Image: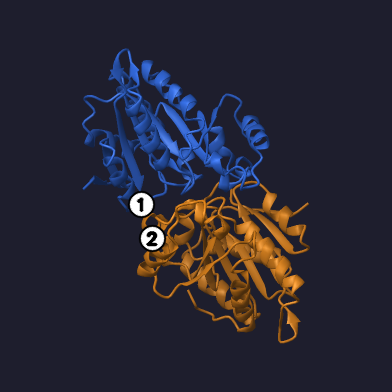
Chain colours: A orange, B blue
Amino acid sequence: MAKIIELKRSITRSNDEDAALLRSELSSKGITLINLMSSPGSGKTTLLSKTISDLDALSYTVANTPIRIAVIEADIGSDVDALRMEKLGIKALQAHTDGMCHMDAGMTRRCIESLDLTDTDLVFLENVGNLICPAEFDTGAHINMMLLSVPEGDDKPLKYPLMFASSDVLLITKTDTLDYFSFDMELCISRVMRLNPEIKIFPVSAKTGEGMDAFESYLKEVSSQTPHSCSN
Amino acid sequence: MAKIIELKRSITRSNDEDAALLRSELSSKGITLINLMSSPGSGKTTLLSKTISDLDALSYTVANTPIRIAVIEADIGSDVDALRMEKLGIKALQAHTDGMCHMDAGMTRRCIESLDLTDTDLVFLENVGNLICPAEFDTGAHINMMLLSVPEGDDKPLKYPLMFASSDVLLITKTDTLDYFSFDMELCISRVMRLNPEIKIFPVSAKTGEGMDAFESYLKEVSSQTPHSCSN
């Protein structure tokens, strides 16, 4: 059984202040928090599973120490994702958002405080599947990472601009299906770059492994740096 | 250029009362309103395009009159969907939700009042792409219809139960990709039926046309009935 935490909307003075404080506390402990956002079914959990398996298999190390990962799975009410993570032997916490469509900094803090992070370098927060509201709430993460899957279509940057504009990293997932869907990679990337010229883009397929090397090298790099206290 | 309407959140006593009133007014004019909901990229606009083209090509008629369709495209800020609809020669209105992740009854009324519905039998409201919030707000529609696309995965009923429980009709879209994704149709349908034993389910592919006949016959049937004033 995955550990489950029941959350309520945070009642705080300022989500931005709460987020900055959480980010700074995590930084001082050498922990990097990554906020993973996307539509339902874009492949967040599959990407995480593949990444965790790869990093373990390849014995990725930072200064001769493995990257130690923990995962917070946020969901309206189910625990299917945390159960998938636990099978990989990873520290996983299932957070229930009481029907809410996003995580905020207070909710994230409650999750962080429920996990034993003594030996952890990287925490992934898998946010609720939604391309709208999660973009509006700073969770306290050092890196905002989003997924867009090929079957969703190359017009999504036009329709959900805030999510693309507020992400530091974009993973274009399920690239193994490019031949099947009419998804124009070049057009999609140019639409994203117009909204956010600084964004890092990784086209990947967790199924075939294509592009995963570059993404995992990026994670290695991120883990080896002391996180900034105010990158958001 | 598509006609665009800029909406704000409705400030009303009761969304449920507003919705019931709108539904009843539309019924008295013989107009059926269908609220179409799904994740981003599940194929709402493609399904509508295919349906509208088919109905026109087949000269579907109800009591010797063609089904006359209008479409409201709700989106945070773009007008790509209404432009696609207009190309089909259909009455289309683009509604901008000012960043909001759902439509409510007041917002839907403003759209309805902005469209000339003199010669209209069926109005599709393409809600904002989101599997969470739209399920919580009665728009005044006679039928709540949702899409789940095969690439999103068969676990979505476990993760977004309210959306499946509050829909009258489920279209399982992109069935042409069933061989490519590990989507268990039988398991998915059993998960949906547990949440909502009354739901009508249509597996369809707008690409190959598979299953579209059954869906279009259903629309024909719906249009030939005087809409109920309180089906929600």
Dot 2 alpha-carbon crowd within 10 angstroms: few under 14, some 14 to 19, many 20 or more? many
Q: Nearer the viewer, residue A154 or B38?
A: A154
Query: Is A204 on the left or on the right of A69, as rendered?
Result: left
Are the two marked residues, 2 and 1, in contact with CB atoms closer than 8 angstroms?
yes
Mark 1: few, some, or many residues within 10 Å (few <14, many ≥20)? Answer: many
- The chain letter under disc 2 is A
Q: Tell me if A23 is positioned left or right of A220 in this view.
A: left
Residue type pointed to by label 2: Pro
Q: Quadrant of residue A162?
A: bottom left
Q: Position of residue A70 (x, y in %)?
A: 70, 67
For image coordinates 41% across by 31% down, the residue present is B16
Determine whether A21 is above or below B174 in the image.
Answer: below
Picture quarter containing residue B123?
top left
Q: Are marks 2 and 1 on the same chain?
A: no
Question: Considering the numbered disc 1 on the image, is that residue within a helix, a strand or a loop?
Answer: loop
Up-down: is A203 above or below B68? below
Residue type marked 1:
Ile
Secondary structure, mark 2, is helix
Q: Which mark is residue B98?
A: none
Question: Where does label 1 land, which residue?
Answer: B76
> Whole-percent x and y of residue B212?
47, 30
Residue B167 percent location from the top left of the image: 51, 32
x 35%, y 33%: residue: B53
**Where residue B128 sits: x, y (%)?**
41, 45
Q: Which mark is residue A161?
A: 2
Relative depth, front residue between B204 and B71: B204
